[in-house]
Each structure stands twice: as structure tokens, then as C-alpha cells.
Amino acid sequence: MRGSRRGTDGIWIAVLGLGEAGSIYAQDLAARGLKVTATDPAVEAVPLGVVPAGSISEAVAGAGLVLSLVGGRAAEHVLREALPAMEPGALFADLNTSGPDQKRRLAEQAARRNVLFADVAVLAPVPRSRIDSPLLISGTGADALASLFGGWGIPATTAGIEAGAAAGLKLLRSVFMKGLAAVILESVTAAEAAGAKEWMIGQIAGELGPSGPALVARMLEGTGLHAVRREAEMLDARAFLESLGTPHPVTDAAIAWLQSLAHMDQGRVADSPS
């Protein structure tokens, strides 16, 4: 990975997207003494210590590392806008949740520009662990990115040079985590109707070990709060399971719950799942 035109005393990092996760990464990287620039057309202010950029091309020009945290739907558009302004040998890291096929498409586009590509799976909610969230990385830039992150104290492991490998493993993890959340939600909802909500929460938390109470609380709160995003993630997970030829009844049920919660959050009555 070649150096940046912006200076010789350290790599410049461009963060694309200043939503919840992007803002945290930009802020925490800058707080660790790294040079960070960021841009997001929907956000005017940047975190403390971060240099604002007026556009994607301005942000990535000369950056040795670009972190994309724009959401899966915008990921390809943002990559296409960034690549012409990036130097050959620079590293583009896609931290957005999407299926393996999309990650492979992005990697192919990066390769045509001689840009290293890293498919990065974030394995914990960023607001909880912030920049210390564990990461799984695959792609041509996996080793280089893991080395950089390791030097900055960010936990990261590699999953090979094939883009999409990390994304697929994250989706398999989502089948379990979101399926568990759906089971907890269904149990607690029924227990509340039976007047036994707190008893049920205690039973579930006890089975999950020392961190059980906090985990149950996060799932009960976060499942409804982030239902739209998690539904999209689980739709990707189901598509991945279908590509593997494996059954997915639990995933189907989790999607139905999330769809119902998303509709309720939007002030509409959800149809009963078919």
C-alpha cells in the first residue's frame, strides 16, 4: 500500500459516511492521533479532530485508506465515485453489511483501478464497543488492513483473500443473533400477556450466562429500534442461505418479526405474516 500525497508522517484516512457508525470511527481514529478526513452529504458537521471534505473525491484524494460506512444500498455508488480519485495501491475498506456477491462486485471494480479491497464485517454493535468492535476482514487488502488496525489497537482477524468471505460469515452469525433476538422477543411478549414478563426475562438471562441480563435488554430494545436495518440484513442472510442450498425457517420467522416491528415503528398496522 503506497503512501499518501497528504504527508509523509503518517497515513491519511478518509471516512465516507457520517451516520452513527461512521461518526464513531472518524472520531475515535482521530482521537488516536491519526489523520482523518470525512464527508457525508447529509451531515454538515464532522467530529472533533476530523478534517471536513466537500465531496467523496476530495476526501479520498491522496488517502492511503478509505473506510466506507454508507449502508449497503449506497455502497456501490460510493465506491464508483471514489475509485477515480484514489491512488493505485491505496486501500478501500467496505464496512457496510451486504451479501457476498455485492462484496465481490465491489472488489472487482477496485481491482480494475489497482486499488486494494477489504471486505470488513463488524461483529458487534458499533455504539456499544465503538472502535474496539471486533472485525473480520477478507479480500486483497485484508492482511494490510489487519496490520494497520492491529497497530492502532483495533481487534481484527482475517478470513482470506476472497472478498465476500467475511460478509458471508457475518450473515451466518446474523442468522443466530437475529434468530435469538426473535425467540427472546416472542417469549417475552407472550410472558407479558400472561403477567410473567420479568420472570421470563430472568429465565432467559440465566441461561445466557453472566452477560445474559445485558444481552436480553439490548435485544428487547434494539430489535424494534433497528428493525428496518436488521430486516434488510436478514433478507441478505436468507439469500445467502438459499445460495448454499440450506433450509431457513428460523430466518424466515425472524424476518417476519422484523417486518412487523418496522411497520409498527412507521405508525402502520403490519399485515400478519403469511
Image: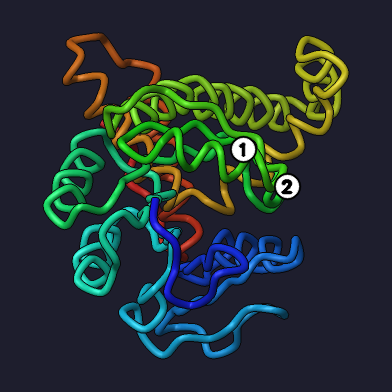
Residue positioned most to the left: 112
Identity, as a three-letter code, of the amino acid under mark 2: Arg
In which quarter of the view is residue 169 placed? Answer: top left
Q: Name the residue under label 1.
A: 124
Question: Which mark, residue 128?
Answer: 2
Pick whichever, 104 or 240, lies toward us. 104
Separation (CA) of disc 2 from disc 1: 8 Å
Pick whichever, 149 or 47, lies toward us. 149
Callout 2: SS? helix
How far across and how far down the image is residue 32, in percent?
75, 61
Identify the residue at image location x=47%, y=69%: 14
Asked whether the beta carbons under mark 2 and mark 1 sit within 8 Å of each other, the answer is yes
In which quarter of the view is residue 2 placed? Answer: bottom left
Identify the residue at image location x=46%, y=86%: 53
Q: Is residue 138 above or below residue 248?
A: below
Residue positioned most to the front: 8
Identity, as a three-letter code, of the amino acid under mark 1: Ala
User: Left or right: 129 with respect to 95?
Assistant: right
- How packed mark 2 is, by other alpha carbons closer than 10 Å (few <14, some 14-19, many 20 or more), is few
Callout 1: SS? loop
Identify the residue at image location x=85%, y=20%: 202
How far across and how far down the image is residue 162, in percent?
27, 28
Pick whichever, 192 or 186, lies toward us. 186
- How packed mark 1 is, by other alpha carbons closer than 10 Å (few <14, some 14-19, many 20 or more), is few
User: Left or right: 196 with respect to 147?
Assistant: right
Pick whichever, 185 or 241, lies toward us. 241
